Amino acid sequence: TENSTPVAELRGAALAARLAEVRADYDRFRARDLKLDMTRGKPAPEQVALADAMLTLPGNGDVFSESGEDARNYGNLQGFAETRALFAPLLGVPPEQVAVGENSSLGVMHDCVVWAMLKGVPGSSRPWSKEEAPAFLCPVPGYDRHFAILEEYGIRAIPVPLTGRGPDMEAVEALVADPSVKGMWCVPQYSNPSGETYAPEVVRRLAAMRTGAPDFRLFWDNAYAVHDLRDAPERVANILDACTAAGNPDRAFIFASTSKVTLAGAGLSFFAASPANTAWYLARAGKRTIGPDKLNQLRHIRFLRDEAGIRAHMVRHRALIAPKFDAVDAALRARLDGTGVAHWTAPAGGYFISLDATPGTARRVVTLAKEAGLALTPAGATWPGGQDPEDSNLRLAPTFPSLEDVRAASEGIAICILLAALERRAA
Ligand code: PLP
C-alpha cells in the first residue's frame, strides 16, 4: 500500500499528502486524551504479586539458617550459606565467592565505584581518585543509572558502540590501552536497552585484552540473568572462568539481584568475583554494616527453594510480559513496516525494546508523544550525559503498563515516529 512507501522516496505532493494524513492520525490519537507511560522499566503490579506468598514468609518461628544462625539478629556479613548456594549457579561462581547484599544491586555497584575511588581495588597502586582523569568505557545504548554514578563522582564516560553481539571489541581494545581507563560497564545478557547478549568471543576478548591499567575492572551487571522472553534462552558465557583462563583472575566484579525475580523493592542483591575481590568487597562492606537482612534471605530460600523454583517463577513472569513485547512489535510493524523510518529490537529477554528512529528526530518524537499524553524516556537517556549524537535512540519499556495500554501507547509511538520523520523530510 501507499502507507508503506519509504519516506525517503516521498517528495512534492505525495510527501505533503502523506504528512497531512499522518498529522491527522496524530491529532486523532491526541484527541483520545490518553494517559500512557512507557518510561518505567519496572515490573507490573501482577508481576510483583507473583511473589505475594513471600509476604508471610519465613513465618512465625522459622528464623534459623540450616546451621542454626538466628536470622533475627546481627551478623553474617556474607549471607547464609544456603542463600549463596541458591544463587551461585545464576552468578556462575562458587558459593564461597558470593556476598549477599541488601535489596539493590545498583547500591552494590555504587559502593564498589566509591570504594575503588577512595581505596583502590586489589592490584591498585593508588586509589582511582588519585589518577589524573579516571574513565569508564560505556557501551551504548546503555543504562542511564550506570552513567549517573560516573557523573556523580567525576569519572569520565567514554561511549563505545554495541554491535548486537556485545561491544565493538576493536574499539574497546584500543581504548583500554589507556591506563586512565579503569573500568567498563557491561550488561552482558539481555542488555539494557538493546536486549543483546555478549557473544562467547566477545566475553573471551574482554577477559583476555591487554589493559593499560593493571587494576582495570569489568563491572559485569548481569541484571537479566534469568529473564527470558522466548523459548530459546540466551546465556552469556562465564566471565569469571574466562578471566581466570586468560590469566586475569581479578578482572571482573559480577552483580545481580532478584529485583525482577521476586520483589523490585525488597529483593536480594549479590556481589560475586574472584577470592581476592570478594575478600576486598567484604572488608569494605564490613565497615558499612554489621550484616544484611537475613530474614529476607530466608524468605527467598523458602519461596524459590532451588534453581528449578527460580526457573518456574520466571516462566510466570514471561507469561505476563512477553505478550506486551509482542504487542509493541505488532503495533510498530503495522504502521512502520516499509517506511524505513525506524528499526527496533525483538529481544529474547530483559525489560526493554531499543528503537532507532530517523536520525535527528528522537527528541521530536518524545515531544510529540508528550503532547499526546504519552510519556517516553527522554531522548538521549541511553547515552552518557544524556547526549545521543545521532538523536535517534529511544528506550521503550513495555512491562509496567497493562497490555491494553501497551497496545495504545505503541500505536501512538509509531505515529509520532512517522510524523517526526515526515516533518523532517518535508522541512
Ligand atoms: N542494572 C540494570 C542493567 C538495570 O536495568 C537495573 C534496573 O532497571 C538495575 C541494575 C537495578 O538493579 P537493582 O534493582 O538490583 O538495584
Image: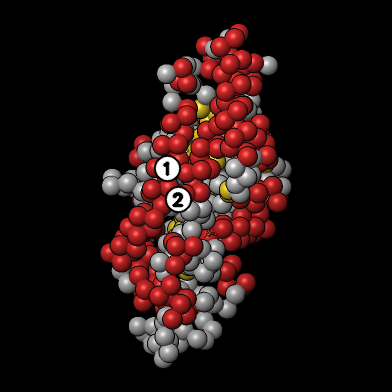
Q: Seen in the image, is 400 located left or right of residue 150?
A: left
Q: Residue furthest bottom?
A: 61
The residue closer to the viewer here, 196 or 282, is: 196
Distance between the alpha carbons at the discs numbered 1 and 2: 8 Å
Which residue bears the numbered disc 2? 403
**Which mark sits nearer the N-terminus, 1 or 2?**
1
Q: Which quadrant would the N terminus be assigned to in this image?
A: top left
Please state the horizontal and vertical placement of residue 103, each as a whole percent of the image. Answer: 53, 67
User: Label 2's element?
Assistant: helix
The amino acid type found where label 2 is placed reads Leu
The amino acid type found where label 1 is placed reads Ala
The residue closer to the viewer here, 396 or 196, is: 396
Which residue bears the numbered disc 1? 327
User: Label 1's element?
Assistant: helix
Task: Please name the colour scheme applied to the rendered image.
Answer: secondary structure
Q: Residue at x 69, y 47 (%)?
A: 151
Please state the horizontal and vertical placement of residue 178, each as a whole percent of the image. Answer: 60, 35
Q: Residue at x 38, y 48 (%)?
A: 323
Residues tagged 1 and 2 counted as in contact (Cβ below 8 A): yes
> What is the crowding at mark 1: few (fewer than 14 residues within 10 Å), some, or many (at least 20)?
many
Please state the horizontal and vertical placement of residue 210, each as a whole percent of the image. Answer: 48, 37
